[in-house]
Image: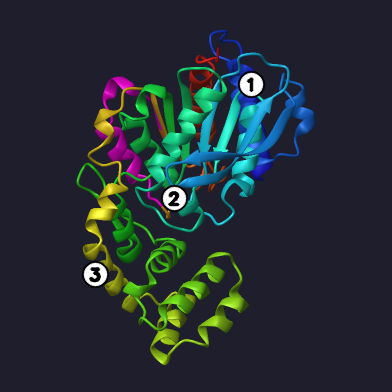
């Protein structure tokens, strides 16, 4: 059924091709490739390029990190894009990221994916911003161009917006796109504990937070939830659980104290009442660090085109966060904002999007690709 939904987008694209000012066929191809990377026969028919991949490294203020470069074959002066992965232990090897990078590169964009160690270790903090900024500077040097694009997925979307507003990096950012991004990290983390979150218009969105959220919070600073003696092993158990190794996680949990085991069992069974109270106290303790990793109060300094995309049913970072971002980013730089039922959390797929929803997603991607291709390298 999901395959058919994207094929419907291509039919819309065929109609849209009657408008010569916009090339919706490329946007449809990217979306189709993102959902199903095996559709080589289809995408080959609409002018895609072979992609050359090369593992490399990036020197950052915190040391050397892994990176990967995706280069479209037989294109001179291709524009560049830094694509930043979300919170996931696979980092630049995360399959959805790899697939997205290949899809974009096949349409004539040099894509650079840096590995951000904190994000790969399930931590969202301001220390990742200089790494993202260093990636922008590095790619601009590689391509001998003053500016390249920047796109972040999930929490990396919010951090990428901070980087785009930072005067150290902003002169080299041609545009920035954030998919499923946060505006106020405190507000999102509080949502994990309360299942509710405020929108800019004063209304409150009620939805059940994804179980992933509390696990990430506990993993990032287990000493706030477990005893000093339990904290290292609790972190190991939580890491195994986040990596979907449930049995191994339970084995480590059995080595904890009775109190530690009780709290871990509550997380396993999604009985969060005790943990939620502890998490709210944790947020109060770390307000300064949380604020530093939040675009809120910083994005008004952005001076490049901005593209925002969010899943309407996203229960990791609720879509109200994009509404906050859209309100705070200067209107003259806000190129496209879409909250779509056609995507979930940074991936295509939703509960029965309408034809209008598919067309809106297609239009957003076309606007993004048009901007991306307006900045060729020298």
Q: Which residue is mark 3?
A: 281
Give the magenta range: 317-337
Q: State yes or no: discs 3 and 2 in contact (Cβ < 8 Å).
A: no
Along the viewing direction, whichever of 139 and 42 lies nearer the viewer = 139
Comes first in the chain, label 3 or label 2: 3
Mark 3 against mark 2, which lies toward the viewer? 3
Dot 1 alpha-carbon crowd within 10 angstroms: few under 14, some 14 to 19, many 20 or more: many
Q: Quadrant of residue 331?
A: top left
* Numbered tag placed on residue 314 in the rendering: 2
* Residue at point 28%, 48% (across, down): 292
Q: Tell me the CA gap for discs 1 and 3.
A: 48 Å
Residue 247 - label: none
Mark 1: secondary structure = loop
Give the secondary structure at mark 3. helix
Question: Is 173 a magenta residue?
Answer: no
Placement of 140 over or under 239, stated as above or below: above
User: Which residue, given by chain and number where applicable, does mark 1 sit on?
Assistant: 108
Q: Quadrant of the C terminus?
A: top right
Residue 96 is situated, as x and y percent measured from the top left of the image, at 61, 45
Q: Is residue 369 among what the camera can see?
A: yes
Q: Residue at x 35, y 82 (%)?
A: 227
Query: Which residue does the image show at 24% across and 69% down from the upper left?
Result: 281
Q: Residues within 10 Å of mark 2 (few under 14, many from 20)?
A: many
- Mark 2: secondary structure: loop
Give the residue at the far bottom of this rendering.
Answer: 258
| Crowdedness near tag 3: few (<14), some (14–19) or many (≥20) residues, C-alpha within 10 Å | few
Asked which colour scheme the image uses, the reply is: rainbow
State the residue lying farthest toward the right. 41
Is the residue under label 2 in contact with that under label 1 (CB below 8 Å)?
Answer: no
Q: In the rendered view of the protein, which quadrant contains the N terminus?
A: top right
């Amino acid at each position: 059924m999901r395959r058919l939904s994207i094929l419907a987008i291509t039919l819309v694209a065929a109609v849209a091709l009657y408008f010569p000012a916009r090339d919706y066929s490329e946007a449809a191809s990217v979306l189709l490739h993102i959902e199903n990377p095996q559709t080589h026969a289809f995408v080959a028919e609409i002018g895609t390029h072979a992609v050359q991949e090369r593992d490399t490294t990036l020197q950052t203020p915190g040391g050397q990190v892994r990176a990967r470069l995706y280069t479209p074959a037989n294109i001179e002066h291709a524009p560049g894009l830094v694509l930043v992965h979300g919170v996931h232990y696979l980092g630049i090897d995360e399959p959805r990221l790899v697939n997205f990078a290949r899809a974009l590169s096949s349409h004539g964009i040099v894509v650079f994916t840096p590995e951000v160690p904190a994000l790969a270790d399930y931590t969202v903090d301001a220390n990742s911003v200089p790494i993202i900024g260093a990636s922008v500077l590095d790619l601009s040097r590689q391509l001998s161009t003053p500016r390249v694009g920047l796109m972040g997925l999930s929490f990396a979307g919010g951090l990428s917006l901070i980087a785009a507003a930072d005067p150290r990096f902003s002169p080299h950012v041609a545009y920035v796109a954030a998919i499923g991004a946060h505006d106020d990290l405190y507000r999102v983390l509080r949502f994990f504990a309360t299942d509710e979150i405020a929108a800019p218009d004063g209304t409150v969105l009620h939805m059940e937070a994804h179980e992933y959220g509390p696990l990430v919070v506990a993993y990032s600073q287990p000493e706030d939830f477990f005893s000093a003696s339990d904290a290292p092993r609790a972190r190991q158990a939580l890491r195994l659980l986040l990596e979907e190794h449930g049995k191994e996680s339970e084995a480590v949990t059995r080595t904890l104290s009775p109190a530690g085991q009780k709290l871990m069992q509550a997380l396993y069974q999604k009985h969060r009442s005790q943990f939620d109270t502890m998490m709210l106290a944790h947020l109060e303790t770390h307000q300064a660090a949380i604020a530093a990793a939040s675009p809120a109060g910083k994005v008004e300094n952005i001076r490049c085109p901005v593209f925002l995309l969010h899943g309407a049913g996203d229960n990791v970072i609720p879509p109200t966060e994009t509404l906050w971002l859209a309100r705070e980013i200067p209107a003259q730089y806000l190129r496209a904002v879409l909250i779509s039922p056609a995507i979930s959390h940074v991936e295509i797929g939703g509960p029965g999007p309408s034809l209008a929803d598919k067309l809106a997603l297609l239009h957003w991607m076309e606007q993004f690709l048009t901007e991306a291709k307006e900045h060729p390298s020298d």
